[in-house]
Image (cartoon, rainbow, N blue to C red):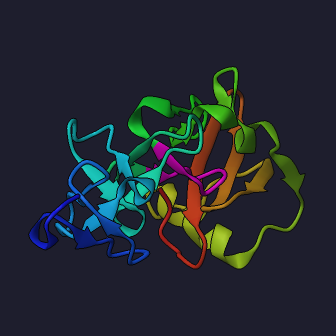
Amino acid sequence: MLASDEVAACTTCGKVICDTHGGACDADGARHCVSHLAPLADRPGRKGCEPHRTTCHVDGVSYSTMGTRPCPVCGKPTCEGHRTACVHCARQVCTRDMDQAKCVTCRHLVEVADPADDLIQAALAANGGEPPRVKTWRTARDASGTVAELDLGWTRRLVFTLAHGELKPK
């Protein structure tokens, strides 16, 4: 038996809870029952409700909303511990989308005879404003945009990424 000042309603489901079976969300302080809270890996000792947490898709661990970022290849939230750099395009991608040292997107680059206009403009910008002397274009699309590899002859390559709807390469 508990007194009325020792219980409160769960913000999510309305169930009446005590301190033992509930807690406060770290982000907004609202009270929730234990089924709607999860411990936050990036904030030890704190918990977050569903709208104020995110889950790393690699291992299912919960983080604060700032604890994960979308993987550029698959678009799913990934924590810093499960991100690694692709040696080809230099993007930070999730470990699930890595195949040896290259990301899945870079592994699936295909030759393109007639690149899109936005890729040509991005290639100019990536080459310092000078038109690159391209022997072949290879491209691949993923959740964040397009990876382009331009063969400039010998062993020289120009690799850049272009986010969907943008003209400035990375």
Q: Is residue 169 above or below residue 98?
A: below
Q: Which contiguous range is marked in magenta?
A: 69-78
Foreground of the two, 1 or 165: 1
Q: Is residue 74 magenta?
A: yes
| Residue for point 50% across, 62% down | 169
* Residue 3, image quadrant: bottom left
Foreground of the two, 128 or 104: 104
Residue reaching furthest to the top = 100
Is any part of residue 65 visible from this angle? no
Could you say where residue 146 lies in the image, as x and y percent from the top left? Answer: 67, 60
What quarter of the picture does the N terminus occupy? bottom left
Could you say where residue 154 lies in the image, as x and y percent from the top left? Answer: 71, 28
Q: Is residue 132 magenta?
A: no
| Residue for point 57% across, 55% down | 161
Is any part of residue 89 visible from this angle? yes
| Residue for point 87% across, 50% down | 111
Residue reaching furthest to the front = 1
Could you say where residue 51 lies in the image, as x and y percent from the top left? Answer: 40, 69
* Residue 40, image quadrant: top left
Q: Is residue 101 left or right of residue 8?
A: right
Q: Is residue 6 left or right of residue 165?
A: left
Could you say where residue 16 lies in the image, as x and y percent from the top left? Answer: 32, 70
Q: How many marks?
A: 0
Foreground of the two, 87 or 26: 26
Q: Is residue 120 above or below residue 74?
A: below
Q: Is residue 107 left or right of residue 62?
A: right
Residue reaching furthest to the left = 5
Majority secondary structure of magenta residues: loop
Foreground of the two, 130 or 139: 139
